[in-house]
Image: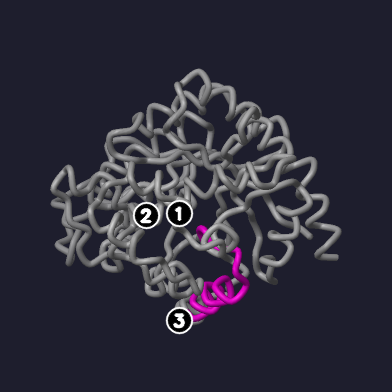
């Protein structure tokens, strides 16, 4: 089973701890480190610069940035600078975003057009072109990078839970992160969309790095690990209120009491109300439990065409994020490989 492994680190860690986790990820065998770009959290590109200065081999990038809070031309300049700092190790993750948009008064309009236009603009600028464009979402007037990038093409990944952007990823992206689903039928839905997009562009899907991206808590006490992730799922589901198509795809029906809390926008109450979530919300959206159980979850999710697994670690009670990263490599993945074979 030739599957590469990546790590997604959230911007919750102090910079010193972030550096330690990135170094650990590189040392134990992950080849990508992604860092979240979330408004009001620690600044993404400063964190990536710290990672760049303290690693030697792993590819690194924002996981993910968006075309609304950062203009794609500025993103092109920033990612080219990161690529220069790392000697050609930069990656660019793009998505629609949403966190913090309400506070900043940002509306994510026409997301498919926004991402398509962003990719074209960023790639053109990296090639050294001067660009004037007035798109449906993105505009630029005689924009040109004032330095020569190390590479004319930095790999671009999409992260999405939507059908149209999944198909767009198959058409124009170098990679895609399929987030938060262990359910085989839902994964097949994404793979079908990627294939349709690739066929539209006249390229084989094998050219695309297709990653399953999971949040994970690994501990010897399965119930405790699931309790940690139940709270995390509750927060994430509540934060995405109004965009719950993916829950239907996963066969998850939320109780009205939880829907009311999510509608009120009170994420603290949502975390406290995690016990309202049905069991399948945890089982189908995250990895949680002892290594054998997590390996079983992953083995059932694996499909031909999946080339990567990206894990965002959460510490079990009494454990550490570093331990989760290590155990995923040493205790989980060998079991997955054996089960798949």
CB atoms of marks 2 and 3 within 8 Å: no
The stretch in magenta equals 177-196
The relative height of residue 71 versus residue 50 in the rendered view (above or below) is: below
Q: Main secondary structure of the magenta part?
A: helix
Quadrant in which the C terminus is drawn: bottom right
Q: Nearer the viewer, residue 293 or 134?
A: 293
Judging by the rendered image, the residue that carries numbered circle 2 is 123
Query: Mark on residue 26?
Result: none
Cα gap from disc 1 to disc 3, whole angstroms: 18 Å
Who's the residue at 55% across and 48% down the image? 215
CB atoms of marks 1 and 2 within 8 Å: yes
Count residues near mark 3 (Cα–Cα under 10 Å), then give few for <14, some for 14-19, many for 20+: some
Q: Is residue 175 visible?
A: no
Point out residue 301 in the picture as x, y percentages from the top left corner.
66, 66
Judging by the rendered image, the residue that carries numbered circle 1 is 156
Secondary element type, mark 2: helix
Secondary element type, mark 3: helix
Which quadrant of the structure image shows residue 258? bottom left
Tell me which numbered mark, 1 or 2, is placed earlier along the sequence. Answer: 2
Who's the residue at 59% across and 28% down the image? 21
Judging by the rendered image, the residue that carries numbered circle 3 is 200
Quadrant in which the N terminus is drawn: bottom right
């Amino acid at each position: 089973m030739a599957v590469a492994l990546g790590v997604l680190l959230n911007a919750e860690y102090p910079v010193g701890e972030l550096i330690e986790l990135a170094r650990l990820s590189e040392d134990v065998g992950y080849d990508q480190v992604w860092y979240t770009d979330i408004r009001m959290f620690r600044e993404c590109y400063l964190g990536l610069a710290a990672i760049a200065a303290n690693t030697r081999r792993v590819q690194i990038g924002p996981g993910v940035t968006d075309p609304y809070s950062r203009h794609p031309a500025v993103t092109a300049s920033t990612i080219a600078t990161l690529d220069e700092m790392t000697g050609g190790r930069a990656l660019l993750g793009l998505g629609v975003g949403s966190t913090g948009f309400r506070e900043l008064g940002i509306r994510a309009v026409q997301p498919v057009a926004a991402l398509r236009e962003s990719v074209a603009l960023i790639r053109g600028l990296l090639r050294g072109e001067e660009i004037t464009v007035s798109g449906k979402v993105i505009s630029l007037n005689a924009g040109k990078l004032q330095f020569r990038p190390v590479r004319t093409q930095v790999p671009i990944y999409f992260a999405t839970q939507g059908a149209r952007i999944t198909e767009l990823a198959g058409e124009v992206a170098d990679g895609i992160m399929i987030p938060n689903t262990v359910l085989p039928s839902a994964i097949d839905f994404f793979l079908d969309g990627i294939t349709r997009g690739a066929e539209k562009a006249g390229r084989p899907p094998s050219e695309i790095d297709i990653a399953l991206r999971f949040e994970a808590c690994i501990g010897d006490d399965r119930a405790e690990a699931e309790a940690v992730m139940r709270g995390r799922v509750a927060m994430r589901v509540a934060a995405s209120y109004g965009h719950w198509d993916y829950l239907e795809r996963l066969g998850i029906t939320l109780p009205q009491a939880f829907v009311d809390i999510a509608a009120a926008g009170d994420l603290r109450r949502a975390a406290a109300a995690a016990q309202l979530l049905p069991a399948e919300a945890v089982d189908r959206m995250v990895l949680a439990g002892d290594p054998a159980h997590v390996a079983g979850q992953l083995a059932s999710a694996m499909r031909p065409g999946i080339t990567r697994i990206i894990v965002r670690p959460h510490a079990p009670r009494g454990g550490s994020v570093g331990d989760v990263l290590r155990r995923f490599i040493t205790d989980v993945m060998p079991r997955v490989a054996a089960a798949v074979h």
